Amino acid sequence: MCPFRAEPPNVISPSNRLLFWTGGLLVPSATVAVMSPEAALIGWAGVAVFAFVAIIDALMGAQTLDGLTVETEAIIRVSKDREATVSLTINNPAQKSRGLRLGLPWPRDIDTEEDELLTLLPSKAESSRVHWNFTPRRRGKYHLSRCHLEGRSPFGLWNVRRPTPIESEIRVYPNLLTERKHVAAIFLNRGTFGMHAQRQIGKGRDFEKLREYIPGDGYDEIHWKATAKRGKPVTKVFQIERTQEIYVIVDSSRLTSREVAIPSTDGTTTTLERFITASLILGLAAERQGDLFGLVTFSNQADSFVRAKNGKAHYAHCRDALYTLEPKLVSPDFEEMAAFLRTRLRRRALLVFLTELDDPVLAEQFIKSMDLLSRQHLILVNILQSPKVKPLFEDSNITSMDEIYEHLGGHLRWRELRELDKKLRQRGVTFSTLENERMSAQLVTQYLNVKRRQLI
């Protein structure tokens, strides 16, 4: 049961109409009463009438907003940078026609075209609904806890204001539509993502049935016990595995707080923001392929774990686990993360790491942690490619000494990544650098290649 909460009192303030009549009637009447003794009676009578009307109007206007309440949706789900609408239901038990001015304390990361909203409540209607458009500019969770109401007194001499409590939570999710031009086939109803049909490689892992031997069957496919029992060669038939577990492991440590360009715009965002968008795109791809999609976020510890499942409700659960994720000013603990995954994941799965390995010490720790996981799971490690990390003589447009040193630093970093790639490949781990603008598409391509080759 909700605790009783007293309704806040009405606040009365003079309106422009009151100020106008004060200057046009009250001041002249008082001036006449003071300056002209012959007309003093008429002047003071005018002052008294004006004061009486203003007081009566104030007393009547104090009840203008009584009984009015505002309701809205408890949870509003929207996407970043996409226009959305919040619906406000105004309950009017008196069913009187009255004009209202509405105000909401919008967070700074939400843009609105109007600072206030004017509406007229119709008569003989217990409730009315108004819509307020807004555009969120940042992913996250926001709360609207009150709505400010303002009405007029009967004669319009006073403004009556009162805040009324509301309970609404705005959940701003990543905007996945910006990635559609790179992975448009995901949003089509095609299980192959628009790719050409290709021959499946391998014979599968799951046993399906026994059948008579056919010339060309390998000796490793013969079921020797059934062959001895039946007196003729019998072959084992395997079916291709269709459902596999896919886990995306997202790094939310200080390494992912670096700013990168937003594709197709002039703005910037964080590396973590790009990782979150790519993770959800990959989740959609796994859903369309019928696989089980799971999620792990970590920093200096495992922050969240969503076990691999499928379905719309599960995808919404994964999205809810990511939309409030922000970079933490801590170093990642890869060994702790690897130990956590070893205890939680018993079945062989595809592990897709989204991280940054700029720190050589942390990169060595990451390599050691892979020894715990690569024996059981198939691992893909992905980092975001920096435009400055490339071979020294790849760019011929160098005009100053500063650019030479800048390219030299990028070359040294490029060599470090190549050494990291070699060490990881020795452990059976695939290492890749993803382009910022094509990150989601490249991640989905990696996943489809694993599916096609039946590597899990």
Image (spheres, helix red, strand yellow):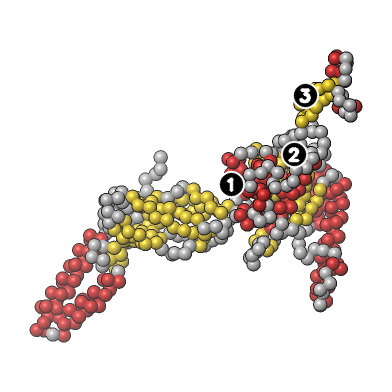
From what the image shows, is residue 314 above or below residue 10?
A: above
Mark 2 or mark 3, which is nearer to you?
A: 3
Q: Secondary structure at mark 2?
A: loop
In the displayed structure, does residue 47 sit left or right of residue 186? left
Q: Amino acid at mark 2?
A: Ala
Q: Residue 282, which numbered label?
A: none
Q: Quadrant of the C terminus?
A: top right
Q: Amino acid at mark 3?
A: Lys
**x, y percent for residue 151:** 31, 61
From what the image shows, is residue 368 above or below residue 110?
A: above
Name the residue beneath numbered marker 3.
Answer: 209
Mark 2–mark 3 distance (CA, rounded to whole Å): 25 Å
Name the residue beneath numbered marker 2.
Answer: 349
**Which residue is found at the position 82% from the left and 36% from the top?**
202
Q: Secondary structure at mark 3?
A: strand
In the displayed structure, does residue 199 sit left or right of residue 83? right
Mark 3 is surrounded, within 10 Å at the Cα level, by few (under 14), some (14 to 19) or many (20 or more) other residues, namely few
Front residue of this view, candidates 391 and 37: 391
N-terminal-most mark, 1 or 3: 3
**x, y percent for residue 257:** 68, 59
Mark 1 or mark 3, which is nearer to you?
A: 3
**x, y percent for residue 294:** 67, 42
**x, y percent for residue 243:** 71, 36
Mark 1 is surrounded, within 10 Å at the Cα level, by few (under 14), some (14 to 19) or many (20 or more) other residues, namely some
Q: Amino acid at mark 1?
A: Asp
Name the residue beneath numbered marker 1.
Answer: 320
**Which residue is found at the position 74% from the left and 52% from the top?**
442
Q: Are marks 1 and 3 in contact (CB under 8 Å)?
A: no
**Which residue is found at the position 52% from the left and 58% from the top?**
83
Place residue 52 in its image quadrant.
bottom left
From what the image shows, is residue 345 above or below residue 446?
A: above
